[in-house]
Image (cartoon, rainbow, N blue to C red):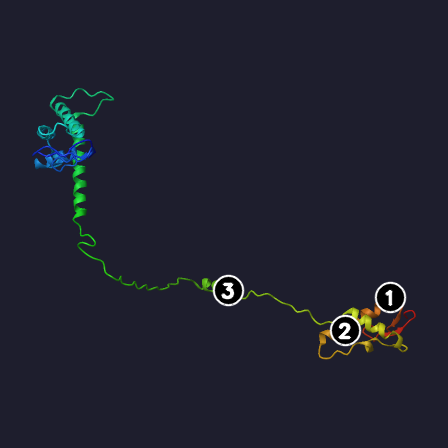
Amino acid sequence: MQGDVFQADEHGPAEQPGERLLLDLDGFEGPLDVLLALAREQKVDLAKLSILKLADQYLEFVARVRQHHLDLAAEYLVMAAWLAYLKSRLLLPEPEPEPGEQPTAAEMAEILAFRLRRLEAMQSAGTALMVRPQLGRHFFARGEPEGIVVVTRSLYDVQLFDLLKAYADHVVRTSVRTLHIEAPDLYSVEDALRRLERMLGRMPDWSVLSSYLPAILGDPLKMKSAIASTFIAALELAKQGRVQLRQDGGPYSPIYIKAGGVAA
């Protein structure tokens, strides 16, 4: 307990090494600690403690200490005054209770006994903790900690549908690719038109249009595009009046071309 008090015992005056000293009355930490020590001297259970006897012992303790030191700490004196008041209430008959009044003397005595039991439990717990073996004093840690072996086992609880769905998801994720389509090498209408225009002056009288196809070998797709482009180019020249076209038979019969004139 800190305060402008002294360090006292029963054998002589106190020394004052500073302005604020620590009060230590026979090793007690406060008035409640003194009460607990006096209660233990009764050698009875704290639940069956005699508050009257305890109050007399505490008042006797305070009077004995004040014979040597008049400047007793205020907390001890307040506790002494409160115990004297409690003792008087316990000795006198209790008046009729009225609403809003203070607790009765029996209730105040029970509260004091409860606080003493709680203090005793706290001191017992603290003592039990302090007597436990301490690291670095009673036992020591190993220099090198042992490694921990971790064993992992995978457990799968799935149905056939789950397996099929997982496989399908994997296939979808891994099969997504970018499709690159290369431009085909086709014979354009412009190429066919230029070819026919170059041959206008050399065209004999009526000749088969297929004879003006370019020589394309080994590429069926390009050959098909050449046939279509040449036919479209011939239609365009016929529209311009630069060539004549005729087809003597029915569908799919040969188409003939001739330079100049009106289409037959």
- Check contact, mark 3 vs mark 1: CB within 8 A: no
Q: Secondary structure at mark 1?
A: helix
Q: Residue at x 76, y 70 (%)?
A: 188
Residue 141 place in picture, x, y as percent: 22, 58
Relative vertical location of residue 80 with respect to residue 173 in this rendering, above or below? above
Q: Quadrant of residue 29?
A: top left
Please state if 225 lies on the left or on the right of 262 as rendered.
Answer: left
Q: Residue at x 82, y 71 (%)?
A: 194
Relative vertical location of residue 4 with respect to residue 254 in this rendering, above or below? above
Q: Earlier in the sequence, mark 1 or mark 2?
A: 2
Residue 230 place in picture, x, y as percent: 80, 72
Q: CA distance from mark 3 to mark 2?
A: 45 Å
Q: CA distance from mark 1 to mark 2?
A: 20 Å
The three-letter amino acid code for the residue at tag 1 is: Lys
Relative vertical location of residue 217 with respect to residue 162 in this rendering, above or below? below
Q: Residues within 10 Å of mark 2 (few under 14, many from 20)?
A: many
Q: Residue furthest right?
A: 261
Q: Which residue is mark 1?
A: 239
Q: Quadrant of residue 245?
A: bottom right
Q: CA distance from mark 3 to mark 1?
A: 58 Å
The residue closer to the viewer here, 6 or 31, is 6
Q: Which residue is mark 2?
A: 226
- Check contact, mark 1 vs mark 2: CB within 8 A: no
The mark found on residue 168 in the picture is 3
Q: Residues within 10 Å of mark 3 (few under 14, many from 20)?
A: few
The residue closer to the viewer here, 95 or 199, is 199
